Image: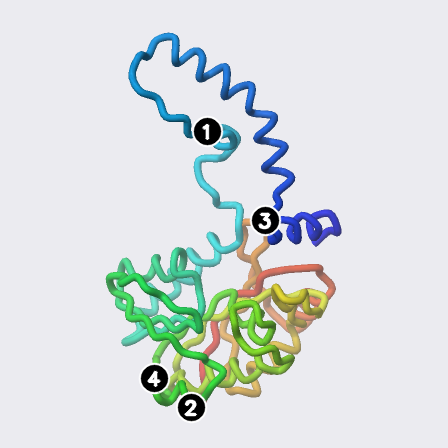
Amino acid sequence: MSRLKRYYYILRNLGIDPYTTLLSIYNLPYYIKSYINFRRNYRGRIVLYPCLLDRHLEAGDIGNEYFWQDLFVSRWVYEANPTNHLDVGSRIDGFVAHIATFRKVDVVDIRPLQAKIPNVRFIQCDLTDIREIKEKIGIEVYESISCLHTIEHVGLGRYGDKVDIFLYKVFLSNLSQILKNHGTLYISFPVGRERVEFNAHRIFHPLKMKHELEELKLKIQEFYVLERTIMKMIKDDEEILELATKDYRLAILNCKKIA
């Protein structure tokens, strides 16, 4: 992320969006002119409800990586058709919504969820606490688990979790424990030059993460990275190591738990 983009991100999280403010000011004359033209021919009640930015938008927001990731992995789950499936921390309004259209899914998150969603059974649980997991979920329960864009946040306190530099390792180990032998884990996380962007997320070294997965008996079956809108397959350790020289890529893995 460039320095300018980083400053912009920080300002937005402080509730300040310079881009939106400037674009709204730019569009204000167009709004006023449109209102005057409409008012000339309409005598009914009008309530002002300015939408100053929408005429610059595309037909849909498909530029973010969540859109492509969620489509890609939901197809994996659809084709595999597991006997049961658990999602951990992925977007409810994205990936979970996709797969809930064609199957039942259990969803675990450290955060609460008040709404009742068809085909979704929600379990509020801290996946870094093995005692809580045994009580609420169980061990070696699921044939298939998804965990998309989640593990990089663990241990940074962003979502009310504990601040602990090694907590993501506990989280990953516990994911393996609730997955049945020969079950499948679909997982995604940022890779590139290894660092922590506190308290947003980690950027993992891809080869180190591959080794950590293997230590937990999670063998990578397929390794992809998202480049803009294209899923690129990574074929060997040399290509994985090359990713460590990049600033940021989203890795999407399909792993099999071996006995």
Identify the disc placed on residue 131.
Answer: 2
Q: Position of residue 188 (x, y in %)?
A: 52, 67
| Helix, strand or loop status at disc 2 | helix
Whole-number angstrom distance, CA of label 4 to CA of label 1: 47 Å
Q: Nearer the viewer, mark 4 or mark 1?
A: 1
Whole-number angstrom distance, CA of label 3 to CA of label 2: 38 Å
Q: On the image, numbered disc 3 is attached to which residue?
A: 15
Q: Earlier in the sequence, mark 2 or mark 1?
A: 1
Dot 3 amino acid type: Gly
Dot 2 amino acid type: Arg
Q: Earlier in the sequence, mark 4 or mark 1?
A: 1
Whole-number angstrom distance, CA of label 3 to CA of label 1: 20 Å
Q: Earlier in the sequence, mark 3 or mark 2?
A: 3
Taking the spot 39% from the left edge, 64% from the top edge, the residue there is 76
Dot 4 amino acid type: Lys
Q: Name the quarter where the C terminus is drawn.
A: bottom left
Q: Nearer the viewer, mark 4 or mark 3?
A: 3
Dot 1 amino acid type: Pro
Reply above or below: 221 against 40: below
**Res 235 → quadrant:** bottom right
Whole-number angstrom distance, CA of label 2 to CA of label 1: 51 Å
